[in-house]
Amino acid sequence: QVHLAESGGGLVQPDTSLRLSCVASGFNLDDYEIAWIRQAPGKEREGVSCVGVSDGSTYYADSVKGRFTISRDNIKKTVYLQMNSLKPEDTAVYYCAAAPLWYSDCAGRGPTDLGPDYSGQGTQVTVSS
């Protein structure tokens, strides 16, 4: 059973940084792509970033490219999202999501979002002055 727990969100001012963490349990992290998905109020879920396993390939949405960095520590079963130069439009609930490697292609088509059964409860990020 996939269990993901996000943390690290908060209320910050524009142009500051946050680091989100996602701790995985109940499954072998080596067999899954991990992605960060966000949902702003009134909007659909948006794939922000993902990281593959074998080659460490990554993907970033254009809106966060150059500002966000994803990384994974398979020993700690944790995936991180370092968010720098935050903007008000980054305000959203951030979820980490898992997708089996056979079903995903992070570098090729970006994050795979299989919905709530394969993601955590989310952590709120609010960027406001």
Image (spheres, rainbow, N blue to C red):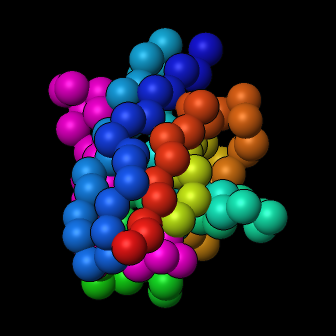
* Front residue of this view, candidates 50 and 120: 120
Question: In which quadrant of the rendered image does the C terminus lie?
Answer: bottom left
Residue 76: say if magenta: yes
**Residue 64 placed where, x, y %?**
42, 78
Work out whether residue 105 can be spotted: no
Of all residues, the one furthest to the front in this rendering is 129
Q: Residue at x 77, y 67 (%)?
A: 43
Q: Residue at x 37, y 66 (%)?
A: 58
Question: In which quadrant of the rendered image does the N terminus lie?
Answer: top right
**Residue 25 placed where, x, y %?**
43, 17
**Residue 60 placed where, x, y %?**
43, 74
**Residue 2 placed where, x, y %?**
57, 22
* Front residue of this view, candidates 58 and 21: 21
Q: In the picture provided, is 93 more to the left or to the right than 35? A: right
Q: Residue at x 41, y 78 (%)?
A: 87
* Front residue of this view, candidates 111 and 69: 69
Counting labels gives 0
Q: In the picture provided, is 111 more to the left or to the right than 73? A: right
Q: Residue at x 50, y 27 (%)?
A: 4
Residue 80: say if magenta: yes
Residue 67 image-quadrant placement: bottom left
Work out whether residue 8 can be spotted: yes
Looking at the image, residue 103 lies above or below residue 15: above
Q: In the picture provided, is 55 more to the left or to the right than 9? A: left
Q: Which residues are magenta?
A: 71-90
